[in-house]
Image: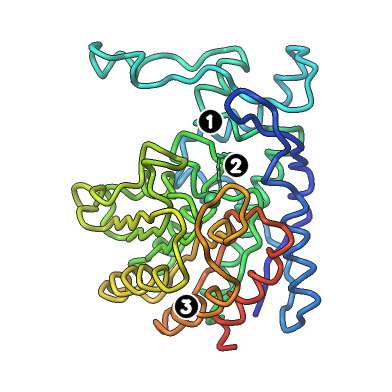
Amino acid sequence: MKVVYSPAHLGHDVTHETYLGQPIPAHEVAERAEIIRAALQHDGGYSFHEPTEHGEDPITAVHDPGLIRFLAEAWPAVQRERLERPYLVADTYPTFRMFEGMSPGLAAGQPEPRSVAGRVGWWGLDTSNPLVEGTYQAARAAVDVALTTVDLVLAGEQAAYGLCRPPGHHAARSMAGGYCFFNNAAIAAEAIVRATGERVAILDVDYHHGNGSQQIFWRRGDVFYASIHADPARQYPFFLGYAHETGEGPGSGENLNLPQQAGLSDERYLVAVDRALEAVVARPGSVIVVSLGFDTYGQDPIGDFALTTAVYAEVGRRVAATGRRLVILQEGGYYRPALGQNTVAWLRGADGG
Ligand code: SP5
Ligand code: ZN
């Protein structure tokens, strides 16, 4: 299988995230992608490809140009404002409750703040998402990794894997968050729709709900989003991911959330996978974009499912058995000792192994 990887992710050199106000060691660290790369190289059977540059247009196809501008300008602004800190995290966010009782137009018409402290909250969701000097370049490279993976599949590969880092599925049209800056999978799906005119399915098997992917395609009939994730009533991102969220307008019925209880077993997980795949194959299209997370693993430090390495091979097999071509993009997964074996298992399954 072809793998797309860029060392640019190393510049997103995150050491800490903020959890309930305290700095804690970051979960989404550079070592994750290096562990996966080393495991695939060691396993053999994978050829590595550098991403090619795709520019801003595929990004603005799903994101607010203001988000790109903010991410490009944030670190220079930190330096210009002499904030003298190793990473930037917001502490004030524009929650919708601030505008309760006021006309919707008021909130929508507020200007973006000028100071970087205001801007990082304006464009952000949460404090687990530190921004450092190399974040923008890394996030741009992750998008190019995703788009190059799309190129490989549209050029005839049955499946290809993009080792995206930072991940993407929490990033919405105008919002970064949850370790994500640009929504790699959404950008990939949109690029496939535009290149082929076909419908596309996103299958999101990260432990967390991909609120960004859901938001971006909420009113779209041409991109089906299916996600298996922790019930938002107990887990991040808390405010989206319920089963009753099914899309609106032309996207009505094109969003499928399958929230799961803590302790989810391999067996029950496969039931959910089959449900999602049944919905995918009921719709036309020839390509599935997989948002692949391993924070579903039993030992993940921020997850509470009970999955084993063996189930990942089986999921890879079942996804490949749809006969659709696969653009497989890395999202989360934070238990580093098993990250390599889990990725190898999933991809081997998807590759007919
Ligand atoms: C891509 C992805 O998997 N993003 C996940 C973002 C999760 N952000 C919230 C992390 C909460 C960390 N909780 C620490 C608990 C320590 N016991
Ligand atoms: Zn996750």
Question: Mark 3 packing: few (<14 Cα in 10 Å), some, or many (20+)?
Answer: many
Disc sitting over residue 159 in the figure: none
Q: Is mark 1 within 8 Å of ligand 1?
A: yes
Q: Which of marks 1 and 3 precedes in the sequence?
A: 1
| The N terminus sits in image quarter | bottom right
Mark 3, residue position: 325
Taking the image as shown, residue 174 lies to the left or right of residue 200, namely right
- Measure the C-alpha gap from mark 3 to mark 2: 27 Å
Residue farthest toward the front in the current orientation of the protein: 263
Tell me where residue 312 appears, x and y as whole percent.
55, 73
Drawn side of residue 113 relative to residue 300, left or right = left
Figure quadrant of residue 75? top right
Residue 179 shows which numbered tag? 2
Q: Residues within 10 Å of mark 1 (few under 14, many from 20)?
A: many
Residue type at tag 2: Tyr
| Sequence-first disc among 3 and 2 | 2
Asked if marks 3 and 2 touch (Cβ < 8 Å), the reply is no
Rendering quarter of residue 240: top left
When the figure is inspected, residue 41 is found, relative to residue 60, above or below; the finding is below
Instruction: Residue type at mark 3: give it.
Output: Arg
Work out whether 342 lies above or below 215. below
Q: Check the picture and name the quadrant holding the C terminus.
A: bottom right
Is the residue at mark 2 in contact range of ligand 1, meaning its CB lies under 8 Å from it? yes
- Horizontal side of residue 122 vs 32, given as left or right: left
Q: Which mark is residue 126?
A: 1
Please state if 319 lies on the left or on the right of 25 as rendered.
Answer: left
